[in-house]
Image (tube, rainbow, N blue to C red):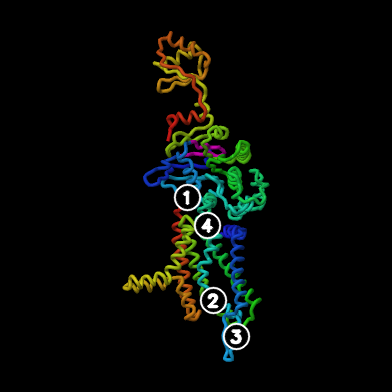
Amino acid sequence: MVNYFNAECYKAFHRKYFYIFVAVILGLAAAFMFLLRVEGMGQTETADGMIMVQRVTVSELVGILAMALSIGLYFLMIAADIVFSDQYKYNTLKNEVSYGLPRCRIYLGKLMASALLSVILCAVLVGGYLGIGCILFPAGENFGTSLGTLGQWLLVALPLWLGGLGLFHMLQFLIRGSTAATVVYVMVVAFLGSGFLELMEVFLPGLEPVAELVRTVSLNTPFTLLGKQSPESLLGYAWALGMGWLAVSTAVGLVGFHKKEIN
Amino acid sequence: MTENVLVTRGLTKRYGSYAAVDHVDITVPKGEIYGLVGRNGAGKTTIIRMVASQTIASEGEIELFGMTEERELRAARSRTGAMVEIPSFYPYLTARENLEYYRRQRGVAGAHVVEDALQQVGLADTGKKKFKAFSLGMKQRLGLALALMNRPDLLLLDEPINGLDPEGIVDFRNLLLELNRQYQTTILISSHILSELQNLATCYGFIDKGRMLEQLSAAELAEKCRDCLELRVGDAPRAAAILERELGYHDFEVLPSGVIRLYEGLGEPERITRLLVEQGISLAGMEHRGANLEDYFLNLIGGVHHG
């Protein structure tokens, strides 16, 4: 498994894809922050008619980041895609199975490499975002507290991202074609969130228990609760939900891949 | 006792009710170059894919280096090198990077094995050229480099010379012969370029419509393909005795169908005809026959088929 993991990391870091993605996202973040620096977060008029520009602090940037953590459910597709590398399009899996590598090792090796790459991506993007913020803005009074809260929110988000990664990984292995796998994943993650529930309420108002169940198992739900509840109170739920998705999708993926024809 | 590297027993692959491979028994002894001969769609690739675990057999057993259990088979497969259909690699990596990826993945010790494999197939100077920019011939060579990287005891090659230029074909043939001679590498090779296969193989398996028709050694094939006079006579045993007694011929065979295959006196058909007629043997026909691998295969499957 160590050899397999080592090889996947070698391949991932030899792709421009990874570096281009990081550069684009950090570039966009820098542009966004530059605009914030120029424009401020808004303007208020004082009693004596003066226009006050609300200056931004890094603490506020941390708050913005925390609100955007659910985007990680979609960013993880990039990490998984870099590792999976269109195996069915390029037919490279045959080189692995014909050498006698167990399919279980292939599946889990790629999953582990995707997870590692996701964590690295997360660290680079969050670190880069905060780094640029620290260069352009003052820290603010509650900087230390904000960072602590961000850490707690990340602890809530991490298992949910891993659950999403397990699901996307399963879809990549079971569906021939990365685009189809991506579409199904986005539908499951996005649709099992608010869209599906709203439709259920309109068309099937009597199925409230089902809607409640869907709401409970949706990977999006803890993110929607982050602003309303403390991160500590969500930790258990988020870890149970994320690990549940990871375990179930990995089990289904392993069984499906075991029987898969490799062309 | 001959050690067999690969044995299949009743190997079958069904897609619904259609049997792409139907109860095929193959025996590949150690150190042999086994040529799998068959038309397109005969089942050659499916057999190799089953041996290489790319597709799962519907029925039957595969024995590799004496191993038959799934877990043991996986270990045995690490002693093989496979090149099935068009070689597949990551298009955005170079030849060296692709091989390095698989070297790490397989835990093959020593970074030099990548360089050695590239040298062996003549791809050492491809530099930073990505796989996606390779010609088909270069892709085939890289596929072979991967198959050779772990110095395999068994090579599984499916149509390996497709896309190679004439010089590449000669290099490829010499490389396989060298591997076979120097390291006793056993090779299972399928090809529909039969003239090329004839230059390599030491034994053959003829397959048609998913079924194994015949397995024989190159010596047996040569024997069957020898130039001969084929005589269709009324009383074959008596005619054979006359030829032996009167003309001193000993190198012939009498087939159950009343045909005598005579491997000497090929330049004396008139003399033979006269003798047999004088001795009261009815002669229905006489034909000078000789066959190569292609003729033999076509005869075996019952002539040229048009799809």
Mark nearest the camera among 1 and 2 is 2
**Residue picked out by circle 1:** B69
Q: Are marks 3 and 4 on the same chain?
A: yes
What span is colored magenta in the figure? B25-37
Please identify the residue farthest to the left as the structure is shown: A206
Residue drawn where x is 65% and y is 43% of the image? B122
Residue A232 drawn above or below residue B12: below
- Residue at x-position 55% and y-position 37%: B33
Q: As rendered, which of A44 and B19 lies closer to the eye?
A: A44
Disc nearest the viewer among 1 and 4: 4
Q: Label 2, secondary structure: give it.
A: helix
Label 4, on which residue? A106
Q: Residue at x 46, y 51 (%)?
A: A261
Work out how far the residue at label 1 is from the one at label 4, CA to CA, in angstroms. Answer: 20 Å
- Residue under mark 1: which chain is it in? B
Which residue position holds label 2?
A66
Q: Residues within 10 Å of mark 2 (few under 14, many from 20)?
A: many
Residue type of the residue flagged with mark 4: Ile
User: Which labelled disc corresponds to residue A52?
Assistant: 3
Q: Is residue B23 above or below residue A41?
A: above
Question: Chain letter of disc 2?
Answer: A
- Frontmost of labels 3 and 1 is 3
Both on one chain, marks 1 and 4? Answer: no
C-alpha gap between disc 1 and disc 2: 52 Å
Read off the chain for label 3. A
Residue type beneath disc 3: Met
- Tag 4 and tag 2, C-beta contact below 8 Å: no
